[in-house]
Amino acid sequence: MAHHHAVRLCSRYFLWGFLPWLVLGCTESSLRLQSNNSLEEVLDEVVLLRDVTGAFGGHPMEIQAIGLVANLDGTGGDPPPSGFRQMLVTEMQKRGVDSPAKILASPSTALVLARAELPPGIQKGDRFDVEVYVPQEHGEVTSLRDGIMYEVRLAEQAVAGGRLRQGKVLGLAQGSLLVDPSGDPDERAGELRRGVMLGGGVALESRPIGLLIRPESQSIRTSAQVGAAINRRFHRTQRGIKAGVAVPKTDEFIDLVVHPRYKDNVYRYVDVLRSIPISETTAQRQMRLRYLRQRLVDPLTAADAAIQLEAIGGDSQPVLLHGLESADPEVRFRSAEALAYLDLPPAAEPCADAARDYPAFRAAALTALGSMDDPSARDALVQLLDEPSAETRYGAYRALRSMNPHDPLVRGESLGDAFSYHLLDTSGPAMVHVARSRRAEIVIFGSDERLETPVILDAGNYVQVNGTAADRVEVVKITPGEGEQRRRVTAKLDDVVRAIVEVGGSYPDVVQALTQAKATGSLKCRFEVDALPDWGRRYVGPQLAEGRSKSSRRMKDSVLGEGGVDTEWEGEAAEIYLIGEGDEEPHEKRREAEAAEDLSSERVFLVPDRRWSWPTRIGRMWSPQGE
């Protein structure tokens, strides 16, 4: 009777909406009555999805094509005989192009290879970056600057039977190329022979992600149980109708739809799903909450405990709130991160503190804040826009855009259909940021920045910025055979950028002018390229590195399965829980050093050498060093 009375009392408190600690108190009262079963026995009875499933679809998929770039200013050339040339000629003939050989021989064109990576969970119609480069043996081509690539069909490719064979076409790509504006034909010629189309690709199909039932557990019944367990915890709304995110397809595969809250962190989404129990009684959940409460306050096990608590949902709120009271930075952050994905307001302030003070947590903290709908998260991100750290403030801007792209603060405008332009009236130090991934975008932090005159800048082949008078600038475009255009404006940076676009300048033209302005000292404020935090940083607290390393290995085994069964999924467990050599430089010293820097650019503007990855994992696509 006492047990049933305690359960009824607990339910009554929950339904009446009393404070979370009352719920936890009832839980602990009930647990004391569980005299017949030990905690270990109860935990053994609860089977999590990660005990019976592995993840599917976690690797980026590389797709490639042979393409043609035009609009070059005499820097192209006729490609030598090769398989690439023959493939391009065949493709041009299929599309009804007259005289392919004549077009290829023109110095205004170049044969290129295009490749991209489709991230896990990408949906049909989503856009992605495309890397473009000239094959090494095509030495006649000296630069792709100002190039425009005709439409190409990107597909998986493999060598079979000694021949290069093309798979299904999965994406289309075309558009203007962004080439390193600081590339020098004499010293850095190779960088002029490659570029990137920002958001130039569009996916023709959605890439599935899902769960695979392990062979020893495969059955229709298990597949149905896994799907039902996931759908009890997560659902999506389509045209006002609720639907589950999991669809069992066979006895071994469950198809997953990405929940909107995890659109920027698919890896965590799968980790959370695989931490859901197949089934669990109320008593078992109460005991497991007590167990996870103990693991959460231990920095060595906090990350895994937070994932499991997040998988439980609202019932875990009292435990996670308790974690926020910890003196350990990692415990506080792991608790706040889980609360953020539950969209609970107490997560906002500690996530913002983690982004501000701890570089190792910054990427995850900003992503978590961007996933929230609560106004407290927006307020926290707005405050981070004023921080001295370049990656913190730009990361906060990106998180705000992810939260709501129509937010007036970050909505910006499209300048001449050339790029997205954002002028933010912030109180922090002035900064100009340009993007080399996802989309053509310039963000200016601080509305009053000016160029220092006199100055002469090139903006592409035909546009020049001449600042010869005090605080006055003339932007001139002279096109052979088409006359000239002129705009006279103040030296205010906003006016200069707009004038370049008005005379016909492109995104690469504006970026080149800004790069030269910084190099010549005319642009005094900070100038940054893709200043986003790196997901690969490790945090080492006061614990001994040896002890934490052992715990990390155990945690990895518990998440990925014995023997590393889950070999396809590159989730957080494998990357963030492992510890590198040494500790982070104290964050106070990092912030002081950044505040006292000489405002020189920290990042070299280079098109990625090999690959970039999943945009939802901020930092896998972009990897600046330090802050």
Image: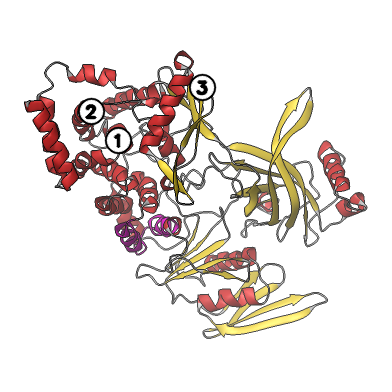
The segment highlighted magenta reads 374-400
Q: Which picture quadrant has residue 160?
A: top right
The residue under label 3 is which amino acid type?
A: Glu
**In front here: 345 or 533?**
345
| Dot placed on the residue nearer the N-terminal end, 2 or 1 | 2
> Disc 3 designates what residue?
252
> Disc 1 designates what residue?
312
What SS does tag 2 mark? helix
Q: How many marks?
A: 3
Is 386 magenta? The answer is: yes
| Residue 335 picture location, percent across and down | 26, 42
Most prominent secondary structure in the magenta stretch? helix
> Disc 2 designates what residue?
288
Q: Residue at x 37, y 58 (%)?
A: 389
**In front here: 222 or 87?**
222
Mark 3 surroundings: few (<14), some (14-19) or many (≥20) residues within 10 A: some
How far apart, in angstroms, are the residues tagged by discs 2 and 1? 10 Å
Q: Residue at x 62, y 74 (%)?
A: 500
Is residue 286 rendered to the left or right of residue 518? left
Q: Is residue 451 visible?
A: no
Residues at circles 2 and 1 in contact by the CB criterion of under 8 Å: yes
The residue under label 1 is which amino acid type?
A: Ile
